[in-house]
Every structure is written in C-alpha cells, then in structure tokens.
C-alpha cells in the first residue's frame, strides 16, 4: 500500500522551504530538507502509514520540492512534473504572497512545538470539512476545534450565559435544545470560537468573550466560511431570509 497523499499543511511547509532554497540545494542530504522531513513526520495528521520507512523521508521531501521547480515560472528548471493539483493550487495561492505563507507555516510550526498541545490535537477527529480549502490547513483547524471544546472554559461560558438569560439558546437563531427536546436537550449547546482561524495563535488563551453559544446547524454554517463569517453576519442572513 502507498503512503497517504500529502495534506495541505505538508505542502505549505514544503513550499515555505522551497522559497528559501536555491535549486542546487534541493537534495536529500541538505540539513534543512532533513529537518523538514522530521517536522512532517511529527504532524498530527496521518495515523496510518503503510510504509513508515519512506513516509515523508528526505528523499520524498526533495522530490516534492522538485515538483515546485516544475510549477515555478521563475525557476528555469524542468523539475519533477508529477506534481498534484493541490501542489499547483497551493503554489499559485502563495506565489505572490510569500510573507503570508511564512506566517501560516510558522503558525503550524509553533503549534507543533508544544508537545502537550500536539497530543491534544491528535484526539480531535478528522471532520467532514474540506481541509484543502482552508487556507491555514488542518493543524490550525484542529487547534480551533480544540479551543471550542475545552471543557473547563465552555462550562464556565454556559453557566454564565444561563445565569444571565435563564436558558441556553443559540446566539444566532435562538434555537433552544431544552425547549425542543425536553430533558434530552437540557444543558446542551455547542461553543464556537469567534476568532478567525487566520488570527488564531497557538499560545494564546481563550477568553469567555472569544466563545459564542450556537446550535449545531449554525455552527456548521459558521465553519463553512470560518475566516470571514461572524456570528453577527450569520444572524443577519437569517433575519433577511423571507418567512414562508
């Protein structure tokens, strides 16, 4: 069996290194290539690695770097033409935005540098969202999910909201699980982290004001445009919808 396809996160980290190297430095004995190989192996993304020996090894990393030579209009090299559509998509996205690329790559690296946090992210299941469309990749998205699910602060948030409002209803559409489902829905509501994923810093602490209580449907809608759609904007969409 083949090893899994490259994630967006892995391509982002590799592309970031590509822009730091000269073509002649792209080889499997380069210390920076070896360092990247070790970093890719530490990502909390792939639990199944059919061929662990070759998984993101320095040779594989150098081949991926050579794929960018074939895509890069400035390289003047043929490179390895077996690049994927995702390789091309990520390259074109950051080709003229290298400062942004470095910020995203460094945010992933910082997250991985916290071993305790990295282990916690491993417990966050892979969800249905298309991580290839999320600019910051799956690692930072899992960080977002972890912040939303922190049991200590979410309990404080729910308790405070209930004390102030006498109920736990969605801050977007006002749906109340207890009102609809009775005892089964008592105390149930989801938490959404308001901070756009592009601004989420690994070392920052979640405040009560960072969280909003939302129903499952509104939460899914917020995550469909996680960098741009706010609680207030989604509420406005609902309010503008014609009543049947």
Image (cartoon, rainbow, N blue to C red):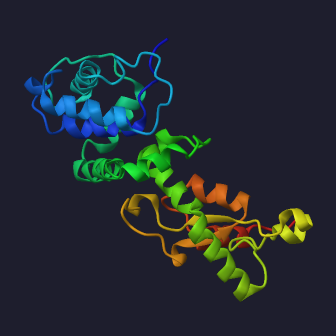
Quadrant of the frame with the C terminus:
bottom right
User: Which residue reaches farthest front?
Assistant: 116
Q: Is residue 3 above or below residue 74?
A: above
Q: Nearer the viewer, residue 184 or 15?
A: 184
Q: Is residue 73 visible?
A: no
Residue 126 image offset from top left, x and y in percent: 57, 40
From this view, report whether residue 158 is shown above or below residue 87: below
Q: How many tags in the picture?
A: 0
Q: Taking 122 as reference, is 60 above or below it?
A: above
The spot of residue 85 in percent (x, y) is 41, 27
Measuring from the top left, give residue 214's x and y in whole percent: 68, 67
Q: Which residue shows up at 38% across the image and 40% down it?
A: 9
Name the side, left or right, on which 166 lies relative to 19.
right
Which residue, as the protein is rendered here, is positioned at the far top? 1
Answer whether residue 111 is visible to the viewer in this image: yes
How far from the left and from the top, in percent, is residue 237?
67, 67
For the point 58% across and 55% down, the residue is 223
Q: Is residue 97 above or below residue 55?
A: below
Q: Nearer the viewer, residue 195 or 43?
A: 43
| Outermost bottom residue | 164
Residue at left 55%, top 45%? 123
Depth order, front residue of 195/123: 123
Residue at 43% from the left image edge and 33% from the top image edge: 7
Residue 93 quadrant = top left
Horizontal side of 147 relative to 84 (left or right) equals right
């Amino acid at each position: 069996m083949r090893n899994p396809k490259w994630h967006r996160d892995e391509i982002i980290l590799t592309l970031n290194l590509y822009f730091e190297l000269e073509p002649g430095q792209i080889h499997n004995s380069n210390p920076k290539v070896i360092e990247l190989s070790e970093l890719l192996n530490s990502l909390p993304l792939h639990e199944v690695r059919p061929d662990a020996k070759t998984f993101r090894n320095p040779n594989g990393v150098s081949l991926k770097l050579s794929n960018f030579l074939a895509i890069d209009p400035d390289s003047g090299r043929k490179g390895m033409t077996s690049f994927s559509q995702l390789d091309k998509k990520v390259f074109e996205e950051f080709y003229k935005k290298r400062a942004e690329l470095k910020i995203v790559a460094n945010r992933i690296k910082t997250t991985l540098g916290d071993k305790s946090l990295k282990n916690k992210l491993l417990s966050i299941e892979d969800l249905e969202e298309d991580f290839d469309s999320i600019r910051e990749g799956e690692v930072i998205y899992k960080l977002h999910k972890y912040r939303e699910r922190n049991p200590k602060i979410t309990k404080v948030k729910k308790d405070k909201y209930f004390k102030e409002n006498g109920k736990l209803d969605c801050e977007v559409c006002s749906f109340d699980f207890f009102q609809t489902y009775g005892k089964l829905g008592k105390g149930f509501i989801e938490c959404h982290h308001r901070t756009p994923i592009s601004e989420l810093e690994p070392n920052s602490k979640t405040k009560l004001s960072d969280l909003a209580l939302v129903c499952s449907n509104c939460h899914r809608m917020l995550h469909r445009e996680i960098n741009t759609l706010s609680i207030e904007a989604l509420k406005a969409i609902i309010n503008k919808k014609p009543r049947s």
